Image (tube, coloured by chain):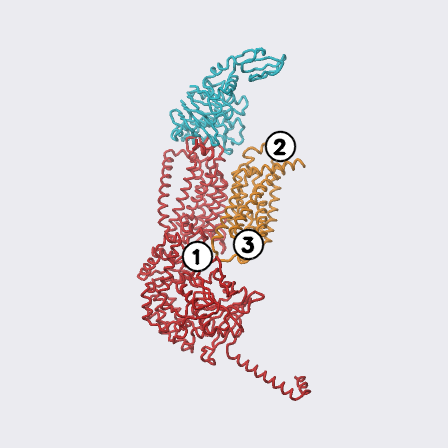
Chain colours: A cyan, B red, C orange
């Protein structure tokens, strides 16, 4: 259980990364979505013990993250895959994993060896495991990143944008890996690719500008947007008047626009079932309106 | 000749007679003149005793031994004329009157020409050895006395006077007219020298006894004297035997006042006089002896110091600026049992004594100073000033007076009234002068109507050895009507009193215990953590990150510097015993700077998210470096011990460890504080360079520039490259411990920078606002 | 050709700006200025055992921090100029652009020269003014000569070596280690090499002739026996340095070409 209460984080230069975030995260896969600069990485880093909260409280499995003992205790249960993963270019994959295992406290060398082998197998890098890391492709580096996060049987896995820059096959592979892990531990997945969430998370939060815009499960998010998603087939102008265009499809008899909002009657719009992406964009667009500037804390 | 005869015959006989008579007259005058030159004073050019030197001409001035008997025996005074480079020199040279009396100067003419280069700018400089001294013939040396001084054993008062009478009897037997060697005749010699060399006017430059001589000349032979410079004056009306106690007492008080004006000296040396008394008594009870190397003979000599020896040392120590600075430190440290400073200021006795002709000294001094003085007067005067008890053994005190009793020359009675003159005179005096105090200079100036008196602070006896007074003298001679002024006088006021290492020792010891205690506790905690979970050290990763190139390079460097034969005159830090101490710490320091820099560490975030503290990464890499370099060091030490015959094994084994730890601490702290590896390396390199190359200049007592003189005394405990023979052995080990502890302390401080993950990740600016929010 | 010159000019401009945005150059210039001011201040507050002609003393006093910093410190601190590109991945981008190798190297060098020269000029003026107000008049011709020879020449030679030698290094750290090895080790041979005007002294990267010649230039009274180096040796050292620089420049350019052809 992760309890976050009124968490604030401010950087020098008056940058408010997080403003009064309050939420609880249970077991399973939890998705954290939001645009770039929303505060996702700051929240991840605070949960991983890398940053200190400016104010508020964070409790991870009962450990208070504002104290150093709490941080130490949490790190022992933690697997962390940062957004920018640096690797030692001259170490081989096995050596690197062995090193991180020691750092995580797997001091017994036979246990360590076993874990490294298991994980190398799990991320399907057994063939390349003795090559130096500088020869690895981007996808392979990510997989090693996941492998190192899984060392030491963590109870909490924090993964920050794991699929950025990967091809669809790699993305699927990593998603499956993480889903498998979700059955054994809490996984917090931060991303701005909605697809990653839709296929695996049953609990998510949308963050923007340091505040929580939505907290709930995917179907609740979709419900929010129900009745707000339409398709408009026209050969004339592109629809506007406060409508957000989600996609544009060239058909033989005109252009089919998928829009969000309430279109005027003359558009002949057809309502459709919202996808998760639609709902996300709808939620984001609603938060820009003046009367909805303050983030809505959702229990 | 034939033509003249023919011409003479062709003219009138009267004219012939006149011509012949004129010729005859000229011849006879010439003959008389030549015959007169056979008398005195005359100058006989001759080769210089030190060989041919450009712009120095030598010769002899022949004068009567006794001016009361002008046709009697003659003596020869050695003269050296130093010519100026100036194309239009002034016609009046400077004649230098040396002190002592009995100090020879012609032999050292080439050296003098460098010291007195300012005097040579516009006019010639004439050096001469006064009658009975130096190279003059006869020279009244007393080898018997030198032998006694050389032997340095305990003798009774009578035993010490024995050589004096031996010398006296010998000189008498050789036919020397000792009573003729007095200041009056000496003054006449100078006038003779002037006429013999053909100068209408001369300038006099006299120091110490030379001022007494100069004043006598001003009184008795004022014609031909253009200007006079008196340096550390002896007024005609004063008597050194009587006033030695008072003068020394005054000088000690001035010393304490001067020390009190210096912040550090006042703090560390509050009671110089009391310490002097204590030490005087202590040394008389149990004298000390030690070996020092005679710089002239390059041989080791035993120097034997009792209370009276100490008194002499302090007395002579107040002469020059350099040694004045050391007097308080010498007294306090010797009293504490630390003889390093004492050994550094002690001079082999033979060196100072052999430059004086004691026969001439006694003849002059006894004739000048025994008129109307009795033994009781001297003792009474001494009793008023306890310091004078020390001077009893001195040649300027009771001992000297006792010697005069044996040196049977009649006192001069007509040279004791104050000299009154209007010859332009510059009177210079030194603040700390123990024998001819500034008050004496003022007394002399009072009776000289055209005189300027200047007291120079921060110096003692013989002020013209310093550039500022020398400039004054040169400016005055160029224009004796104007008083020279300059800001350089005030600059001389502040002395850099040496603070001995013994004073700093307790401070260093306390600091060592405090810092060392804290460091030990922290290390202990860390060691306990390691013991709990030994598997935590990631040796392999650490080894891979540090690499093997530094090992190879250091190994090669060590071999390259150890094996070749040492060239004499190479830098001191490249001698064999110091190679390991110099190279290994540098290698460790440079690598220490490269151990861990947050900005350059690839997997920093992952490392920070692991439960093991990030500082362990740095420590295990440092351990790898230390282990590798220790290996090389041990090999190098084995080589050193094999190549150097009498190396101290235990010292060689450990002397490199403190600088290694110190430099690694400096490097790590610099890198972590600046977050840039290059800075850490540069600072470590600069520290190594500064302390190893300039090591000697950073010892206490070395000359330095203000305000660094406030820092210098405290530098030795932290000096990573202190050598075992620079201070006492105890101080050396204290320094080793201190340097080690400081290095470890810096290491701990550096690692302390890594305690906060956020700081490591973002740097200082990232969290600055944190504190405000 | 025109494009290349424009590229060169722009590269120089941005390199210049980047140098002054970073901390390294500022620190080096401040170090020189502060050390000089410190020396001048101490010098003016003390009586010295020898009389010095003050107009020349300016040169002797402040030449040591200047020459040593430029000869030893600058190459080390500037050594990550090219490896930084590699480490941050900018090189990959640059390789895809139509920038000739000589423009790349030239831009790096010119940018560095411009940056350091500006700093040197400022320090020269500041130090000169401070000297003037603290001690007195100084010989302008000698002063400027020192800044030109000991300053600008050393900058061009040693600074450029600092940029060019590490051209093949993959990371900042390796670059710094390499430069330290090249520029610190010669100090260990100080006793053997420094005092003799020999070929070894001319090619010695820390330029002992220039350093010692200007330190010793404190007026006739002092400079007599202090060093065996004359102004001829300074000239020869500069020539040797320029030859070294040309060689290294050609090697660096060649290495870039070879790498491009290999990849």
**Label at residue B493:** 1
Residue beneath disc 2:
C97
| Left or right of B106 in this view: C232 | right
Q: Position of residue C161 (x, y in %)?
A: 57, 43
> Can you say whether B744 is above or below B83 in the image?
above
> Can you say whether B393 is above or below B571 in the image?
below
Give whichever of discs 3 and 2 has the lower sequence position: 3
The chain ID associated with circle 3 is C
Q: Quadrant of residue B388?
A: bottom left
> Can you say whether A221 is above or below B441 in the image?
above
Q: Position of residue A141 (x, y in %)?
A: 51, 28
Q: Residues within 10 Å of mark 2 (few under 14, many from 20)?
A: few
Q: Quadrant of residue A150?
A: top left
Q: Marks 1 and 2: CB-CB under 8 Å? A: no
Question: Which label sits in the foreground, 3 or 1?
Answer: 1
Q: Position of residue B702 (x, y in %)?
A: 44, 54
Residue beneath disc 3:
C56
The answer to whether residue B213 shows anywhere in this view is no
Callouts 3 and 1 in the same chain: no
């Amino acid at each position: 259980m992760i309890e976050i209460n009124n968490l604030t984080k401010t950087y020098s230069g008056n940058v408010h990364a997080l403003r009064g975030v309050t939420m609880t995260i249970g077991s399973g896969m939890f998705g954290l979505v939001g645009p770039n600069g929303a505060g996702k990485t700051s929240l991840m880093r605070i949960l991983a013990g890398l940053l200190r909260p400016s104010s508020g409280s964070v409790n991870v499995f009962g450990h208070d993250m504002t104290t150093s003992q709490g941080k130490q205790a949490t790190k022992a249960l933690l697997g962390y895959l940062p957004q920018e993963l640096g690797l030692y270019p001259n170490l081989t994959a096995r050596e690197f994993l062995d090193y991180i295992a020691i750092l995580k406290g797997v001091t017994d060398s036979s246990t360590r060896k076993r874990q490294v082998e298991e994980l190398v197998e799990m991320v399907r890098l057994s063939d390349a495991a003795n090559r130096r890391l500088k020869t690895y492709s981007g996808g392979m580096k990510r997989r090693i990143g996941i492998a190192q996060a899984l060392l030491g049987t963590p109870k909490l896995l924090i993964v920050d944008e794991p699929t950025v820059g990967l091809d669809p096959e790699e993305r699927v592979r990593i998603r499956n890996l993480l889903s498998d892990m979700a059955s054994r531990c809490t996984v917090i997945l931060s991303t701005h690719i909605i697809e990653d969430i839709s296929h695996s998370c049953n609990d998510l939060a949308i963050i923007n500008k340091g505040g929580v815009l939505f907290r709930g499960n995917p179907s609740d998010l979709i419900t929010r947007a129900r009745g707000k998603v339409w398709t408009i087939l026209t050969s004339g102008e592109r629809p506007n008047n406060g409508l957000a265009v989600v996609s544009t499809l060239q058909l033989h008899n005109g252009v089919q626009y998928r829009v969000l909002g309430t279109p005027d009657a003359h558009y002949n719009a057809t309502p459709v079932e919202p996808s998760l992406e639609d709902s996300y964009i709808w939620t984001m667009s609603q938060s820009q309106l003046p009367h909805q500037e303050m983030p809505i804390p959702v229990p | 000749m034939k033509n003249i005869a023919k011409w003479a015959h062709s003219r009138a006989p009267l004219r012939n007679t006149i011509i012949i008579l004129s010729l005859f007259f000229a011849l006879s005058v010439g003959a008389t003149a030549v015959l007169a030159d056979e008398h005195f004073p005359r100058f006989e050019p001759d080769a210089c005793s030190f060989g041919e030197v450009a712009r120095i001409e030598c010769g002899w001035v022949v004068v009567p031994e006794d001016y009361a008997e002008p046709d009697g025996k003659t003596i020869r005074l050695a003269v050296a004329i130093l010519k100026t480079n100036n194309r239009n020199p002034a016609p009046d040279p400077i004649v230098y009157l040396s002190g002592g009396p009995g100090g020879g100067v012609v032999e050292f003419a080439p050296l003098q020409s460098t010291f007195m280069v300012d005097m040579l700018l516009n006019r010639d400089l004439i050096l001469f050895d006064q009658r009975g001294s130096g190279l003059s013939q006869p020279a009244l040396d007393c080898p018997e006395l030198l032998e006694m001084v050389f032997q340095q054993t305990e003798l009774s008062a009578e035993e010490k006077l024995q050589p004096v009478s031996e010398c006296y009897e010998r000189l008498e037997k050789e036919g020397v007219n000792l009573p003729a060697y007095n200041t009056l005749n000496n003054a006449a010699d100078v006038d003779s020298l002037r006429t013999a060399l053909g100068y209408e006017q001369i300038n006099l430059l006299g120091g110490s006894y030379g001022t007494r001589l100069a004043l006598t000349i001003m009184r008795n032979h004022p014609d031909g004297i253009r200007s006079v410079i008196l340096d550390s004056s002896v007024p005609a009306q004063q008597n050194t035997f009587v006033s030695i106690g008072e003068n020394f007492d005054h000088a000690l008080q001035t010393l304490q006042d001067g020390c009190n004006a210096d912040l550090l000296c006042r703090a560390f040396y509050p009671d110089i006089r009391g310490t002097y008394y204590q030490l005087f008594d202590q040394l008389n009870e149990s004298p000390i002896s030690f070996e020092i190397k005679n710089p002239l003979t390059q041989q080791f000599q035993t120097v034997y110091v009792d209370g009276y020896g100490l008194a002499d040392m302090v007395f002579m120590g107040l002469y020059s600026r350099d040694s004045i600075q050391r007097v308080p430190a010498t007294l306090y440290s010797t009293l504490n049992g630390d003889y390093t400073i004492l050994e550094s200021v002690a001079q082999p006795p033979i060196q100072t004594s052999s430059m004086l002709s004691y026969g001439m000294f006694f003849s002059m001094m006894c004739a000048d100073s025994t008129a109307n003085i009795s033994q009781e007067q001297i003792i009474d005067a001494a009793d008023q000033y306890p310091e004078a008890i020390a001077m009893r053994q001195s040649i300027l005190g009771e001992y000297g007076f006792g010697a005069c009793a044996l040196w049977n020359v009649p006192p001069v009675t007509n040279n004791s009234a104050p000299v009154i003159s209007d010859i332009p005179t510059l009177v210079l005096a030194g603040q700390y002068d123990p024998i001819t105090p500034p008050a004496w200079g003022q007394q002399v100036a009072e009776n000289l109507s055209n005189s300027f008196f200047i007291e120079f602070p921060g110096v003692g006896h013989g002020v013209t050895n310093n550039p500022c007074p020398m400039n004054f003298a040169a400016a005055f001679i160029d224009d004796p009507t104007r008083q020279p002024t300059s800001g350089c006088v005030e600059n001389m006021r502040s002395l850099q009193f040496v603070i001995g290492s013994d004073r700093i020792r307790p401070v260093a010891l306390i600091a060592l215990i405090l810092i060392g205690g804290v460091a030990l506790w922290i290390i202990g905690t860390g060691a306990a953590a390691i013991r709990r979970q030994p598997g935590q050290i990631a040796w392999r990763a650490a080894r891979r990150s540090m690499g093997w190139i530094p090992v190879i390079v250091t190994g090669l460097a060590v071999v390259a510097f150890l094996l070749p034969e040492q060239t004499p005159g190479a830098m001191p830090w490249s001698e064999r015993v110091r190679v390991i101490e110099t190279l290994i710490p540098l290698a460790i320091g440079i690598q220490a700077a490269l151990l861990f820099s947050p900005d350059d560490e690839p997997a920093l975030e992952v490392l920070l998210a692991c439960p093991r503290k990030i500082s362990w990464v740095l420590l295990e890499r440092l351990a790898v470096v230390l282990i590798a370099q220790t290996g090389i060091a041990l090999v190098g030490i084995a080589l050193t011990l094999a190549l150097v015959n009498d190396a101290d094994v235990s010292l060689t084994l450990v002397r490199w460890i403190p600088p290694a730890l110190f430099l690694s601490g400096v490097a790590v702290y610099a890198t972590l504080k600046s977050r840039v590896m290059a800075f850490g390396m540069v600072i470590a390199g600069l520290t190594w360079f500064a302390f190893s190359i300039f090591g000697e200049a950073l010892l206490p007592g070395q000359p330095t520039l203000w305000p660094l003189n406030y820092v210098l005394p405290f530098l030795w405990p932290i000096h990573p490259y202190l050598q075992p023979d620079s201070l006492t052995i105890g101080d050396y080990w204290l320094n080793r411990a201190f340097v080690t502890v400081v290095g470890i302390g810096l290491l701990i401080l550096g690692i302390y920078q890594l305690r906060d993950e956020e700081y490591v990740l973002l740097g200082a600016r990232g969290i600055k606002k944190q504190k405000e929010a | 050709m025109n494009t290349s010159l424009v590229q060169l000019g722009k590269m120089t401009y941005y390199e210049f700006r980047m140098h002054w945005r970073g901390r390294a150059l500022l620190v080096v210039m401040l170090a020189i200025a502060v050390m000089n001011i410190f020396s001048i201040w101490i010098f003016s507050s003390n009586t010295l055992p020898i009389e010095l002609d003050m107009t020349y003393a300016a040169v002797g006093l402040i030449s040591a921090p200047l020459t040593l910093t430029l000869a030893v410190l600058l190459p080390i601190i500037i050594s990550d100029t090219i490896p930084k590109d590699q480490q941050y991945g900018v090189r990959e981008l640059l390789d895809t652009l139509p920038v000739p190798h000589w423009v790349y190297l030239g831009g790096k060098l010119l940018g560095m020269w411009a940056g350091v020269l500006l700093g040197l000029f400022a320090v020269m003026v500041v130090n000169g003014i401070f000297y003037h107000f603290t001690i007195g008049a100084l010989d302008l011709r000698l002063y400027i000569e020192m800044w030109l020879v000991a300053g600008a020449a050393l900058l061009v030679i040693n600074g450029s070596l600092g940029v060019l030698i590490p051209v093949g290094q993959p990371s900042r750290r390796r670059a710094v280690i390499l430069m330290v090895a090249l520029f610190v080790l010669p100090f260990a041979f100080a006793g053997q090499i420094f005092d003799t005007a020999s070929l070894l002294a001319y090619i010695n990267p820390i330029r002992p002739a220039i350093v010692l010649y200007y330190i010793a230039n404190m007026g006739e009274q002092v400079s007599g026996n202090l060093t065996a180096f004359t102004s001829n040796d300074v000239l020869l050292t500069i020539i040797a340095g320029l030859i070294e620089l040309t060689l290294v420049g050609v090697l660096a350019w060649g290495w870039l070409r070879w790498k491009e052809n290999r990849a």
